[in-house]
Amino acid sequence: MVDYCFGCTQPKELTLEHIIPQAVGGRLKAYLYCKECNDRFGREIDTEISKQFGKIATLLNIKRERGYAQPFEVMETSAGTELVFNGKDFTRKRPIIKISSKDGKKLDAADITARSKQELEEIWSSIQTCYETSGEMQPFQEAHPGPTDVTYEITINNALLRRAIAKIAYSFFCIKVQKSVIFSSAFDQVRTYIKDGKGPNLSHANFVNTQFMTDNVRLLHKIHIALSRDEKMVVGYVSIFSIYRFTVLLSERFSSQLEWADLDYTFDPVHLQEVQGNERFRAPNISKQEVLQPTQSKEFMLAELSKGYKLIEHYVDNYQFIRGEVN
């Protein structure tokens, strides 16, 4: 399919784009970018969505269109043990091997904590080639009584993630308005920002101006585009899993003779279905300052994140959000 690429604006063969990356359960697709742009975006910024938010998709066991949910690393809080969670089970990140030998030749003792029977046998075989051994290996099953309390980190406001979020809002905008509007100079700045990260930051984690983006009941992906004719601004709102919310300045110099209805897309990634919203809803007008530098305390952000994470408890057995930190 040859058309103008919405990234480089050149006439090229277009490839299929997941507007919300499928690593977090996105299903909305369109032919928007050429292979060069698509590959570059995937390599440079889309992977940041998977890296940061794919953990939630794994936790919720969300089916991907391609590939499988990626295990992610966590830290057991009681012992500081590095674990890997695959959506169902915890395993150690690496085996633990403790060897005691007074003369460096004869094995006095070996304490091995392996992640599988095969790994245990391979480690023991390797030890036998290095040391003189007597006696047999005595394996036993490691037990973890009670729930596992773990911690993990998610970044919600780094440079790559801001660009990736801007691309989600821009891509959705591309499928909703005329090409002549998209390819106008009013959107050159956001294209440059998405492609190269140049110019001012046009995206920011925003919890104070985006509370309409969640119903505090379901874990939803949501994209909302609003036009402020008086301010000549086009503002994008993006929410991932109803937990992480952002605003994007798509344009600050767009003139329109007509008032636009807000554009909205809401998707339930757990049940893989689109959710119909109120067609008459209009996002509240906010200033450029509120889009790019929202006034929100760490305490407020943490409270909003906590409310979002509490929603996971309705979906995942034996999951409980205990606490969080904002740096």
Image (cartoon, grey):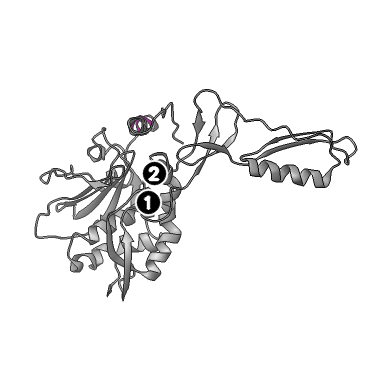
Q: Is residue 102 left or right of residue 52?
A: right
Q: Is residue 32 visible?
A: yes
Residue that lies at the very extreme toward the front in this rendered image: 136
Q: Is residue 159 visible?
A: no
Name the amino acid, label 1. Arg
Task: Categorize mark 2 by other alpha carbons within 10 Å: few (<14), some (14-19), many (20+).
Answer: many
Question: Which mark, residue 64?
Answer: 1
Residue 102 on image: x %, y %: 88, 35
At x 45%, y 41%, the residue is: 154
* Circle count: 2
At x 24%, y 63%, the residue is: 186
Q: Is residue 14 above or below residue 98?
A: below
At x 34%, y 49%, the residue is: 25
Question: Which mark, residue 57?
Answer: 2
Q: Which segment is the magenta one?
A: 300-304
**Earlier residue among tags 1 and 2:** 2
Q: Nearer the viewer, residue 306 or 66?
A: 66
